[in-house]
Amino acid sequence: MSLSEAISTFVQDGCNIVLGAALENAVPFAATHELIRQGRRELNMIAPISDISTDMLIGAGCVTEVTGAWVGNVSGGMGHNFRRAAEKGLPHPIKVNDYSNFTIGMAFFAGAYGLPYIPVKTILGSDIMKSNKNIRLAEDPFSGEPVALVPALKPDVAFLVVQRADKAGNSHIWGSTGLTQEASIAANKIIVLADEIVEPEVIASDPSRVLIPGFGVDAVCHVPAACHPAPLIGKWKRDNHFFHDYHKETRDPADFDRWCDEWVRDLPDHEAYRAKLGGQLEDLRILGDIPSAPANYATE
Amino acid sequence: MTHEYSTQELMIIAAARQIADGERIFVGMRLPITAYGVARLTHAPNAVGLFESGVARYEPADGMLYTMCDGPNQLGAAWTTGLIQIMGLLSGGRVHAGFIGGAEVDRFGNINTSYIGDIDDPKVKLPGSGGAPDIAAMAERLVIIINHQKHRLVEKVDFITSPGYLDGGDARKKAGLPGAGPAVIITDRAILKPHGPSNEFHLASIHPGHTVEEVVGNTGWDLKSFPEVEQTPEPTKEEMDALHHIDKEGFWRS
């Protein structure tokens, strides 16, 4: 399925969307762009960090709610669109649901495994307990000590980038994965953006490397470099200049609009985006080969 | 002075000295990860570095990292896994110390990285917490690194993103926080530590070339001093050699 078709099929206005659950690598920026192109509105973007993806969607007017631990430009500073929306209501006011990284992780965990809420200690003492009315202070019935109750998060749709998948969505991921697994399993629909599509035997040869099995996946899209400008382990380096340029070129709303036209709205799809990057993208392609040792699954 | 060093390099060495051998440390990018590297090469060869995204490392990565998820931070890692597995070490009480910075810190070591002004109508919306509250709540101790300016070291933060000693005294314990709290604030002028039953941060040592008046004048609360204020010990040759080995391009030298 094309990414455009997957988004028009599975994402409606007002959806709760997980995008960027891996933190700063494997961010599905190709999906960010397509959500902007299709003009989705009133989205709730959910992710621990997700680098500049959420800032782009806010600037493009797609977002009315942000659920997460950090929004900005990890190597470049603050996110101008996030600040404008939170401070001045431009282009729309946004509601911010604050979490810490671990508490949003446990909220996904609860959502994934059918727990109504989960008790945690790591957010005690933080004013996030006051700003996020969903998190409640309670007494541990066993020890009598204070505990924070974090309700389950069950997003409508999760986007994830994987190094390789087969056509059925059985996916291999390696490197750190942040909250990819819990956030995806918690979601109602899973859309996989595969850097490479491989034969089913390749995935089946190493089931321990499967983070998300195909039977839970609703759409598989072959999108090379869907993570750009974020890195993908063994595939793409991080485009640090791109993050820096984004910071410089989105300082006011008109600048952001120009940036968004040039890099998103005026391009029909991710193939055109890759073509526009041209040699800049090729320079980020990882050409080296440092494979892990094979794992033996023989039965006799 | 036996050798040259910049203020930033002095801060890195002071931070490195906060890491004991064999400890598991939440590292963070830039200055703390450099400090971790120095500690590993000098007095703490068995320290373990933890990164929220799901990475644990022995040796720090080669070269400059822009994020903890960059490829070089994953190549040869001790463990690449998920956030819950790594931050679960914190929640399980298995982490000795963490480094964090922020926009504001107050006299009880509470840190704000969320809102300047009113929550509902903020003057500045800062990026947010990341995993800092989790580290502040659960690590056995916390090391805070911040530039020493009056608008950064404030009487009371507008929003406690990451808890220090809250309102002081035993408020932190009453709130049910397992970790002991911030042990030290390292700035570009001085080192502050909590003192007495209030746990208010006091001036513990001054970096060479700075004065008590200057430090007090650049602090947003009525900064009191320990009975004896020392000079922050200068970096040793061994420490500076280790730092230069890591920082080959001289990023921290000026």
Image: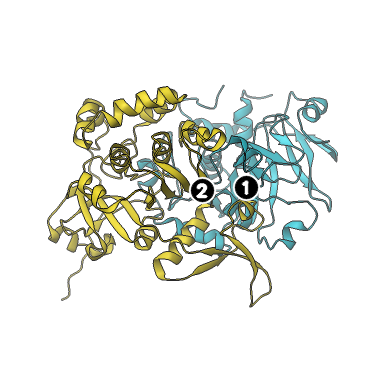
Chain colours: A yellow, B cyan
In front here: A87 or B29?
A87
- For the residue labelled by badge 2, is the local secondary structure a helix, a strand or a loop? loop
The foreground one among A181 and B48 is: A181
Which residue type carries mark 2?
Ala
* Percent of width and height locating residue B71: 35, 42
> Residue A73 — which label?
none
| Residue located beneath label 1 in the image | B161
Residue for point 51% across, 32% down:
A84
Horizontal and vertical percent position of residue A36: 32, 38
Q: Is residue A19 above or below residue B231?
A: below
| Residue type, numbered disc 1 | Thr
Answer left or right for B171 relative to B95: right
| Residue that sits furthest to the right in the current view | B227
Q: Residue at x 84, y 53 (%)?
A: B197
Q: Is residue B74 left or right of residue B212?
A: left
Question: Which mark, residue A69?
Answer: 2
Question: For mark 2, does the 10 Å Cα neighbourhood hold few (<14), some (14 to 19), or many (20 or more) residues?
Answer: many
Give the structural element (helix, strand or loop) at label 1.
loop
User: Split into 4 quadrants, where in the image is the C terminus of chain A?
Assistant: bottom left
